[in-house]
Image (cartoon, rainbow, N blue to C red):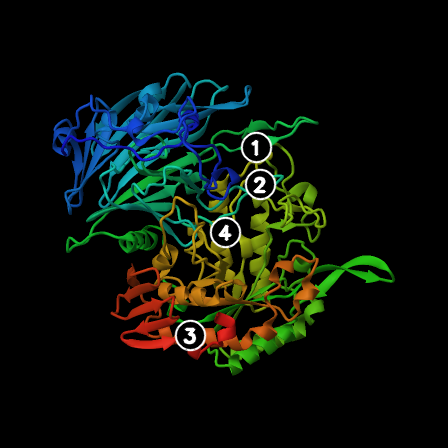
Amino acid sequence: MQKKMKKLLACLCCLAMMVPTFAVSVSSDDENAADTSSTETSEEGEAISEDDYAMDEDEPLITDEQAMAEMKLAAENSRMALYYNDKDITLAVVDKNTGKIWWSNPINADASAGKAAQKQELKSGMTLIYGEPSKRRTTTNQSKARSDATMQVSGNTITVTYDFTDAEIVVPVTYTLNDNYLSLNVDTSKINEKNSDKIITDMAFLSTFGAAEMDEEGYYVIPDGSGALINFNNNKAGYRVYQGKVYGNDITAVKTTKPTTGRNVYLPMFGIVKGDSGMMVVADKGDTCATINAYVAGQKNTSYNSCYFDFEIRTSDEFLMGGDANPLRVFEKRGILVPEIEVRYYPVSNSDGSDVDYVDIANSYRDYLTSDQGVTRSDAAGNNSLYVDFYGATMKQEPILGFPVTLQHKTTSFEDAQNILEQLKGEGVEDMTVQYHQWTTADIKEKVADKAKPASVLGGKSDFNALMDYANANGIEIYPAVDNLTFKSGGGYFTMTDTTIRVSNAYSRQIVYDLAHGVENKYYDAMSLLSPRKYGKMFENLGKSYSKAGLDNISVGSATTVIYGDYGKNSVSREMFKYNLQEQLEGLKNSVPSILADGANAYVLKYVDHISNVPLSSSKYDVFDTEIPFYQIVMSGLKPVSTTAVNGDAQIADLVLRAIASGSNLHFDFTAEEANELKDTKYDPLYYADYKYWVEDAAGCYKFVKEALSGVEGVEIAEYNILSDNEIETVYTNGVTTVVNLKDKTVTKNGTKISIYDYVGEEVIG
């Protein structure tokens, strides 16, 4: 590495220098994390120029070879070697396939741009946030500046003990070299909080592992929504750093105004790509409290790019006292309820020495799912299916003798559903996977639905059985759905005893936000959030009832995409929620063999056979450079995935073509009622779903996708190449290649071109 001047691009305003390394409980769909432009100013209020943040020429640059000369070998195998320096508490992982050295901290941190605080962060192996409940505040400590760290080596394991003297907290961290990955592990029972008035709230480890310098090329793979890439040094220093809460925010704490919504982070991992070497990083344990952080050069007043996890091991909440406008912060009362944190670092390379890309990262993560998480290939992965969602009934105020009365309002009866399926079949749709929402009286009345009892308002048991008989005779899979996230008292569940408790000790009441103003819509009653403590009873009843009714399929609604804790007397953390849900799904599968997930976080992938309603876009934060169907690439050949509702999208052709490029099935929402009948109900957002306008076009879209993807059912994606703004090439492992042209609205498969206009009318696709 030659000594040279490296000028930093635009930086955040100097106020950002005072912000802690990572925010408590901030994620990509929190209003505080939304990307906004900012004007950089110096402490004097003048604009900051690039020359103000150049590399420190007084500090000599060192080479990898010089830095490695100070390292000691701890362990090695045929794939990797682990080195350490017990003087400055640094690690180095050597990928033997490529010779690439992955440093735990930048070796030229002292020579980098930025102030002393930023340099201390770059050189730290751990960052700790601790709370002081009596003072209702948190403090951030960097290990390099605020801890006495020691390092011990035993076999293939290095133990680093961080003693944060100011915080009076000791945290031991172990690093173990395994056959094909390096693991970072924290047994939280061994954390010593010496002073009960100072408690850990957040921890981050190796926050600059593999950090990229300003002359490096590469990118980070972020599993936000379908997926996104953040290029190193992308000239976006003026935007906020990326923070994505894995599996989404804990919804127990209800905000008075609607948070800025983004896509979910379904997978607890990220990727680093640097030429012929890459690293797939996964939160193997403690994933439910993890947040992915990523920043580029200039965003944190340094000349480095980095991506890492932080872990919120105690959550907090806010509440108002009387007329006080300033909320008070309270912390989780119990001890640490996250038993273990483990992060794994998998080196990624190609046997032919070619450059690594995001498909290689996806392949590495898929291998992890199948080899370590027990995820198996679904039998349905080999099908091209049209995914259809029916919406049965909802509650609606109607005038009776001049008085408003809330009644069950039929939207799609069982007879209606059969009629729609018959029409789709008549239009040439050969394979359908159907999710049926609000089909029981309990669900319609917003109570916990744990019994398979068809609602009489939809036609009752006889019409339901007729629908199921028709479906079975025609090879159609119907998944009667339940969504017991929120509830009203009844059927053995009571809001006084079975509602989730917030950290602030209040009941968690979920509200509907006004679409225009983002405040609570008082037209709808606040709903109680069902405590995870009741999931055992609920899932046991579901399994018995569905099995007795002869139902082999089920969809469990929000349970596969939402994760939260209960912080009352019998505390349930997000991590405990995960393991509890996995146990319940395992038991449910013994009674009901096939489960459809309406979106799927990583921890349920082992148990589901279909994944519906997966977006083909990210949260579109400004720091992102490219959107990719990373989730779909991971699932290719493993689980069948469908899109979000095609008929609910403003750009139908674009969604259909991108579905083909990603190997996805299509999904349509259908109701038998006209849009005006849904007004002032919770089905109001389904204004687009009247089936009468969509049957023919849904069938046309299905046939177009089926033709384009014929021959790649259940086959993994080998390459996904964005050729231009309008062209995407997808290569499958069996050699089939498709090229989607978004402008011409065509697909060329192995040299044969087909057009969406041959299947769907121009008035629909534009």
Kind of residue sitting beneath label 3: Ile
Determine contact: label 4, label 1, CB under 8 Å. Answer: no
Q: Position of residue 283 (x, y in %)?
A: 36, 42
| 3 or 1: mark nearer the eye | 3
Q: CA distance from mark 2 to mark 4?
A: 14 Å
The answer for how far apart the CA atoms under marks 1 and 2 are is 9 Å
Rendered residue at 41%/22% (across/down): 43
Query: From what the image shows, is residue 193 above or below residue 599?
Result: above
Q: Do the CB atoms of the residues marked 4 and 3 lie less than 8 Å apart?
A: no
Mark 1–mark 2 contact, CB under 8 Å?
Answer: yes
Residue at screen point 51% across, 81% down: 427
Circles 3 and 2 in contact, beta carbons < 8 Å: no
Residue 442: x %, y % from top left = 68, 58
User: Residue at position x 56%, y 80% from top?
Assistant: 423
Q: Horizontally, is 49 left or right of 87 in the view?
A: right
**Residue type indicated by callout 2:** Thr
Q: Amino acid at mark 4?
A: Thr
- Rendered image quadrant of residue 239: top left
> Where does label 3 land, which residue?
756
Which one is in front in this view, the residue at disc 3 or the one at disc 2? 3
Q: Which residue is mark 2?
A: 252
